[in-house]
Image (tube, helix red, strand yellow):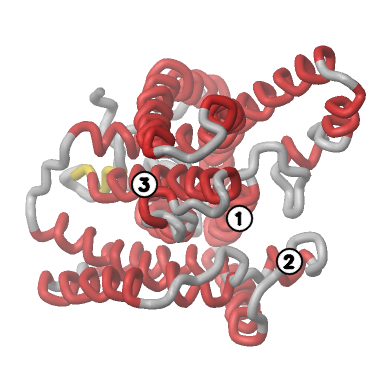
């Protein structure tokens, strides 16, 4: 599935690249980034399946609770996003004339497929509303999307359960846009970073709906994860670490991830210290290996990375049907449920690859050509 080469002057979004991140004069494809995206998306899917089995079958541990910390895939996504946007968009810095191009490409990457997912879920809600009884209609009445749902504003009304993370992505894009307007505006992202670090060391966890948005979002510890990725981007732009150092850091990342006790999803400060730091170390190790050697990863890993954004968007809506079907067919847990959950991961991956190839990719190219007719679509 070859595409036109990408360089650092034609940036691609962390939300979803087409065929990997290509940078530098030799236009090498960073396949490790795509592989990491695919792994992150699938671990999030496995985490939600683990939750479903635990809640539906008296706290049964799916796959031995191997993916009970699979939500950490989001932390890896955030660190990768920080790396990619800095590493591929550095030539835009202090060039305000490129702001429209930058923002348009960010818009095209994130919103169209997200809107399609929301519209699809809304259509299903309409059908359920028309076919259901009073109890179903009363339940649906409180779930209809509103303008905040479509805009992805902080604390927006969530229809697709993963969309909260897209608000953080957009926030980071806007902070980086400050540097495009003027390098002197570096103080803006630094102030938000310092505020996030302050909240990290003074707060333990946050309860959405009860915590002020200024702490839960604008100065969330999760914002620091984008900064960690940005540090990796600057590091590899200037002088990549030597092989021994990168290998050491990558190994430390594995130890950091699996040796520490489980951190709960809601404990954002501890989550940063555990999964955010581990993602930073692992990403450094992977990129060092790819910088030192010519890596050729299996095509399916790259394709999964290509489709990672679609996997992320569609797996929860698909699980609504999957979970109801499984519980109806298997009132009590059996090993077959585990096999069917594995089949769901494979099936949703294959479906997402098809959606990426036949819907997302052409749609993004068409929109980019229309909105930026003088720019080659990335």
**Residue 221: mark:** none
- The image shows residue 361, relative to residue 64, as above or below, that is above
In the picture, measured across the screen, residue 54 lies left or right of residue 198, that is: left
Marks 3/2 in contact by CB < 8 Å: the verdict is no
* First of labels 3, 2 by sequence position: 3
| Element at label 3 | helix
Q: Give residue 245's quadrant in the image.
A: bottom left
Query: Residue visible at 63% across and 72% down?
Result: 192
Task: Give the farthest residue toward the left.
Answer: 293
Residue assigned mark 1: 168
Task: Give the CA separation, mark 1 to mark 3.
Answer: 17 Å
Residue assigned mark 2: 207
Between circles 1 and 3, the one closer to the viewer is 3
Residue 342 drawn at (x, y percent): 36, 36
Residue assigned mark 3: 37
Task: Give the farthest residue toward the front.
Answer: 332
Residue 364 seen in the current view = yes
In the picture, measured across the screen, residue 3 lies left or right of residue 148, that is: left
The front one of 7 and 216 is 216
| Element at label 2 | loop
The front one of 291 and 148 is 148
């Amino acid at each position: 599935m070859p595409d036109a080469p990408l360089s650092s002057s034609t940036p691609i979004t962390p939300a979803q690249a087409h065929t990997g991140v290509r940078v530098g004069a030799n236009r090498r494809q960073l396949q490790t980034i795509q592989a990491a995206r695919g792994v992150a998306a699938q671990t999030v899917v496995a985490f939600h399946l683990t939750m479903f089995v635990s809640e539906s079958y008296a706290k049964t541990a799916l796959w031995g609770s191997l993916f009970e910390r699979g939500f950490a895939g989001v932390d890896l996504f955030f660190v990768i996003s920080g790396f990619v946007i800095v590493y591929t968009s550095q030539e835009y810095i202090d060039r305000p004339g490129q702001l429209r191009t930058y923002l348009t490409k960010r818009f095209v990457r994130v919103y169209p497929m997200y809107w399609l997912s929301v519209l699809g879920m809304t259509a299903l809600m309409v059908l359920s509303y028309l076919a259901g009884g009073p109890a179903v209609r009363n339940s649906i009445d409180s779930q209809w999307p509103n303008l905040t749902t479509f805009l992805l504003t902080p604390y927006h009304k969530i229809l697709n359960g993963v969309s909260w993370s897209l608000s953080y992505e957009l926030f980071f894009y806007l902070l980086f846009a400050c540097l495009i307007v003027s390098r002197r505006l570096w103080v803006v992202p630094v102030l938000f970073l310092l505020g996030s670090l302050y909240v990290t060391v003074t707060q333990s966890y946050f309860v959405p709906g009860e915590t002020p948005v200024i702490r839960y979002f604008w100065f969330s510890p999760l914002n620091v994860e984008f900064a960690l990725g940005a540090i990796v981007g600057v590091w590899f732009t200037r002088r990549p670490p030597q092989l021994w150092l990168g290998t050491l850091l990558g190994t430390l990342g594995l130890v950091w991830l699996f040796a520490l006790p489980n951190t709960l999803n809601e404990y954002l400060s501890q989550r940063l210290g555990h999964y955010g730091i581990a993602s930073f170390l692992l990403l450094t190790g992977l990129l060092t290996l790819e910088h030192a050697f010519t890596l050729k990863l299996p095509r399916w890993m790259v394709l999964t990375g290509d489709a990672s954004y679609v996997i992320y968007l569609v797996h929860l809506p698909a699980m609504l049907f999957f979970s109801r079907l499984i519980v109806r067919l298997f009132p009590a847990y059996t090993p077959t449920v585990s096999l069917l959950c594995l089949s769901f991961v494979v099936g949703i991956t294959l479906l997402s690859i098809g959606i990426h190839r036949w819907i997302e990719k052409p749609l993004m190219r068409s929109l980019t050509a229309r909105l930026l007719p003088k720019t080659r679509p990335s």
